[in-house]
Image (cartoon, helix red, strand yellow):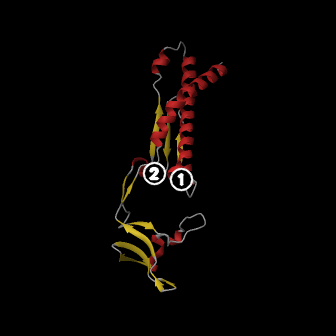
Amino acid sequence: MIKYSVQTDIEAALRKLSSIAEAQQFRFATAKALTQTAVDVQKEVRKNMPSRFIIRRQWVINGIMIERATKANLEASVYSRDKFMGLQEFGGQKGPLRNYLAIPTSMVRRTKTDIIAKSDRPGALGDKVSIIDFNGHKWLALKKPRKGANGAKLRLLYLLIPRAQIKKRLGLELDGMRVAKANFATNLQSALEQAMRTAR
């Protein structure tokens, strides 16, 4: 899980307040402003993801979550619940779980939403496929080539590589810092005004 937090130091401001009630109202307003700022960041990150990724399922976008601030803990966080998004935020090398990373080719069947069915993923193909060397690379290919007009056609389903370089592109920190700087003061002012209106 990757996480970025928005925090604020209000201790100096609290010392200037004349009563415990005022301090509690200020803490409540600050927590509300931090939470609203986290919501603003969450919306911005989710909005930008389709331009940075090929999104085939909404759950990746929905995985951008927030943790709310409270009066006792003046910290709000925005994070991805999907561990694999860490590489998308920071970049780096992705290694294989076993021997190779399998990169699908256009010969792998896909659904109408361009998703590879579980039955056509490398781990599910079993003895239908074998690893071959072709054109200087290793491939996962069907054992029984598909027949075409000119005879049998080699069906290369997955290119097998030892690792891949992942570029950072999620932008959680960049979006987060930009939106927090732009919105927090306004959110705090609004929360303080509401706290004063509702104070008893």
- Label 2 – label 1 distance at C-alpha: 9 Å
The amino acid at mark 1 is: Val
Above or below residue 126? Residue 54 is above
Front residue of this view, candidates 26 and 151? 151
Label 1 near label 2: C-beta < 8 Å?
yes
* Residue 138 horizontal/vertical position (percent): 36, 72
Q: Position of residue 51 (x, y in %)?
A: 53, 50
Q: Residue at x 56, y 38 (%)?
A: 39
Which residue is rendered at x = 53% and y = 29% of the image?
184
Task: Label 1: state its secondary structure.
Answer: helix
Numbered disc 2: secondary structure: helix
146 to 101, vertically: above or below: below
Above/below status of 169 relative to 38: below
Q: Residue furthest front?
A: 150
Q: Choose between 69 and 20: the one closer to the eye.
A: 69
Q: Compared to 135, does 73 lie above or below?
A: above
Total marks shown come to: 2
When asked about the image quadrant of residue 26, the answer is: top right
Which numbered dot is residue 132? none
What residue is shown at x 60% (from left), y 26% (from top)?
Answer: 191
Q: Position of residue 89 (x, y in %)?
A: 43, 47
Pointer 1: what residue?
Answer: 60
Tell me the crowding category of disc 2: few under 14, some 14 to 19, or many 20 or more residues within 10 angstroms, Cα based.
Answer: many
The residue closer to the viewer here, 155 or 28, is: 155
The mark nearer the N terminus, 2 or 1, is 1
Pick the quarter of the image with the C terminus. top right
Residue 85 is marked as 2
User: Is residue 117 something one can see in this rendering?
Assistant: yes
**Dot 1 crowding, Cα within 10 Å, few <14, some 14–19, many 20+:** some
Residue sticking out furthest to the bottom: 151
- Identify the amino acid type marked 2: Met
Residue 28 in sight: no
